[in-house]
Image (cartoon, rainbow, N blue to C red):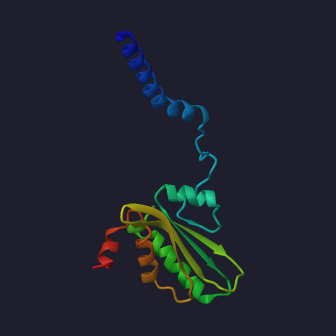
């Protein structure tokens, strides 16, 4: 009887131990980490080309927000909006937190300011975006949208809501 008890106890320990170790063995055998070494992330905060989705994802993983500004060269107000965006990106409170894509386009529904970042809702953090499409986009609208989509918004964002 005592031998059966010891044998049963040994089998239970092996089962529990085996089930605890199997996931680690499977992960080590079949897991391949994502390839991020090949992705060239821009070193400047303002680029004049369209980023690939992999580049945008890498920037977002760094905790930064991405502003995609699409505009037409024929649009006079677009240059004003472009100037506002460049000023915001270069403000010290937003330094190294935003990457601005400036994309020249021939589409007729421009200018378009697409802000991509993180929306914090309760205990959840999700990727979110805000699209501002107007010839009269103001600095206040842009900053308010940015503040809602940043992981670490500057103090000025909190003061705007007071």
Q: How many dots with numbers?
A: 0
Q: Is residue 30 left or right of residue 108?
A: left
**Residue 45, image x, y percentages:** 52, 64
Q: Is residue 32 above or below residue 84?
A: above
Q: Is residue 104 above or below residue 3?
A: below
Closer to us: 30 or 35: 30
Q: Is residue 21 left or right of residue 157?
A: right
The answer to which image quadrant residue 111 occupies is: bottom right
Judged from this view, the residue extending furthest toward the left is 162
Q: Is residue 147 left or right of residue 22?
A: left
Residue at coordinates 56% horizontally, 33% vertically from top-left?
Answer: 26
Q: Is residue 14 above or below residue 76?
A: above
Residue 48 visible in the current orientation: yes
Closer to us: 131 or 138: 131
Image quarter (top left, top right, bottom left or bottom right) of the N terminus: top left
**Residue 115, image x, y percentages:** 52, 72
**Residue 62, image x, y percentages:** 48, 55
Closer to us: 59 or 96: 59
**Residue 97, image x, y percentages:** 45, 63
Image quarter (top left, top right, bottom left or bottom right) of the C terminus: bottom left
Residue 97 visible in the current orientation: no
Q: Is residue 141 above or below residue 25?
A: below
Residue at coordinates 51% horizontally, 74% vertically from top-left?
Answer: 86
Judged from this view, the residue extending furthest toward the right is 106
């Amino acid at each position: 009887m005592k031998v059966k008890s010891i044998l049963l106890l040994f089998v239970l320990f092996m089962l529990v131990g085996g089930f605890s170790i199997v996931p680690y063995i499977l992960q080590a055998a079949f897991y391949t980490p994502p390839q991020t070494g090949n992705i060239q992330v821009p070193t400047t905060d303002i680029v004049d080309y369209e980023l690939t989705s992999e580049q945008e994802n890498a920037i977002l993983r760094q905790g930064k927000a991405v502003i995609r500004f699409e505009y037409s060269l024929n649009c006079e107000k677009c240059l004003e909006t472009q100037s506002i965006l460049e000023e915001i990106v270069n403000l010290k409170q937003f330094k190294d937190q935003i990457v601005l894509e400036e994309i020249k386009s021939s589409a007729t529904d421009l200018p378009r300011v697409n802000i991509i970042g993180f929306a914090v809702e309760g205990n959840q953090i999700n990727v979110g975006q805000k699209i501002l499409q107007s010839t009269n986009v103001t600095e206040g609208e842009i900053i308010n949208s940015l503040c809602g989509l940043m992981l670490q918004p500057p103090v000025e964002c909190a003061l705007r809501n007071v």
